[in-house]
Image: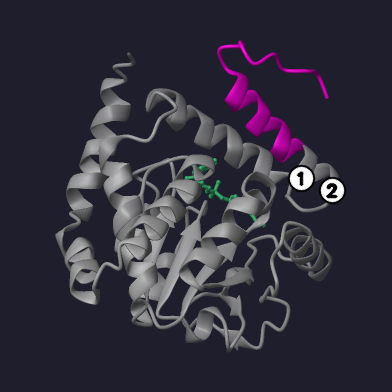
């Protein structure tokens, strides 16, 4: 890998790109993941590669929702595993959530490689290998879930997938928290809490919010109020406006 100097103007973005490349080499990320990364980078560039205020509000609402949930689950695909393994494990610990591997281009080999990779980054248990239940209404591989994981969850974090699973999860009565840099992606459009931010910034910021709420013993009423006052339409519109205007500092 080429050494990327800290003062390179795109250092963070180039390092993120290398993580995806390494994920493909390790058998964790699919080749399509390279294309998905390029798609995400474009939106991030137009967002100024920063967490805009409406995304921060979404991350706080998501943290509150995860703390309120009886059974929160964080879904992990090949891109998420390559980009943010430690951050996902830390968030799961902060909000007491399960982690479950769920793939579009599913192979048992890749599910196992991702589970091992997450365990190498501190995960105590990883779901997704049993795949003994199905999300109704989906006829592709993302329908395969664990009965005691996503199938049983009341809140699910769905990062980096532009598809129909978020809607199917909502139809099952679950709250879907979507992380996607594209505010027009189908998943973001149907999410109860759409987070329009790069996963490498979004997940640590959700953990920071969760810890802050826990440290000051925020009541269930306060957590519910944070979730209720989050305006999903406004958040989607603000992100789209930021991208379309492309006004960078
Ligand atoms: O590992 P698998 O088999 O489950 O496949 C994973 C990918 C990502 C290849 C698969 O889900 C896919 O093809 O996804 P899409 O349809 O390209 O959607 C990915 C979405 O994530 C797009 O809307 C991108 O804008 C967005 N995205 C890409 N990189 C990031 C991102 N959002 C947040 N942070 C990123 N770093």
Q: Residue at x 42, y 66 (%)?
A: 166
At label 1, counting other C-alpha atoms closer than 10 Å, the crowd grade (few under 14, some 14-19, many 20 or more) is: many
Asked if the beta carbon under badge 2 is closer than 8 A to the nearest atom of ligand 1, the reply is no
Quadrant containing the C terminus in the rendered view: top left
> Colour scheme used in the picture?
one colour
Asked if the beta carbon under badge 1 is closer than 8 A to the nearest atom of ligand 1, the reply is no
Which residue is identified by label 2?
26
Q: Secondary structure at mark 1?
A: helix
Q: Where is residue 121 shown, x and y percent of the image?
A: 73, 56
Q: Where is residue 213 shown, x and y percent of the image?
A: 32, 61
Q: Which residues are magenta?
A: 1-21
Does the magenta run of residues contain 215? no
Find the distance from the CA under tag 2 to the CA under tag 1: 5 Å
Placement of 75 over or under 41, stated as above or below: below
Placement of 228 over or under 138, stated as above or below: above
At label 2, counting other C-alpha atoms closer than 10 Å, the crowd grade (few under 14, some 14-19, many 20 or more) is: some
Q: Residue at x 46, y 68 (%)?
A: 95
Q: Which mark is residue 23?
A: 1
- Asked whether the residues under the numbered discs 2 and 1 touch, taking CB atoms below 8 Å apart as contact, a structural biologist would say yes
Question: Which of the 4 image quarters holds residue 239?
Answer: top left
Q: Where is residue 68 shown, x and y percent of the image?
A: 33, 75
């Amino acid at each position: 890998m080429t050494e990327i100097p800290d003062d390179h103007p795109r250092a963070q973005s180039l390092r993120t790109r290398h993580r995806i490349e390494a994920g493909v080499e390790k058998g964790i990320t699919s080749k399509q993941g390279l294309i998905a990364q390029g798609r995400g980078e474009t939106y991030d560039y137009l967002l100024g590669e920063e967490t805009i205020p409406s995304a921060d509000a979404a991350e706080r609402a998501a943290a509150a929702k995860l703390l309120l949930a009886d059974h929160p689950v964080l879904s992990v695909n090949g891109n998420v595993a390559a980009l943010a393994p430690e951050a996902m494990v830390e968030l799961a610990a902060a909000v007491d959530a399960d982690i479950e591997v769920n793939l579009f281009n599913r192979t048992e080999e890749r599910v196992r490689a991702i589970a091992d990779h997450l365990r190498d980054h501190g995960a105590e248990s990883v779901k997704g290998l049993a795949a003994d239940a199905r999300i109704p209404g989906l006829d592709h591989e993302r329908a395969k879930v664990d009965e005691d994981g996503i199938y049983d969850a009341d809140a699910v974090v769905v990062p980096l997938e532009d598809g129909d699973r978020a809607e199917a999860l909502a139809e099952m009565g679950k709250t879907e928290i979507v992380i996607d840099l594209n505010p027009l992606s189908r998943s973001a459009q149907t999410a109860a809490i759409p987070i329009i931010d790069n996963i490498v910034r979004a997940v640590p910021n959700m953990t920071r919010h969760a810890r802050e709420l826990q440290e000051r013993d925020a009541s269930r009423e306060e957590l519910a109020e944070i979730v209720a006052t989050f305006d999903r339409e406004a958040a989607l519109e603000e992100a789209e406006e930021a991208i379309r205007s492309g006004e960078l500092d």
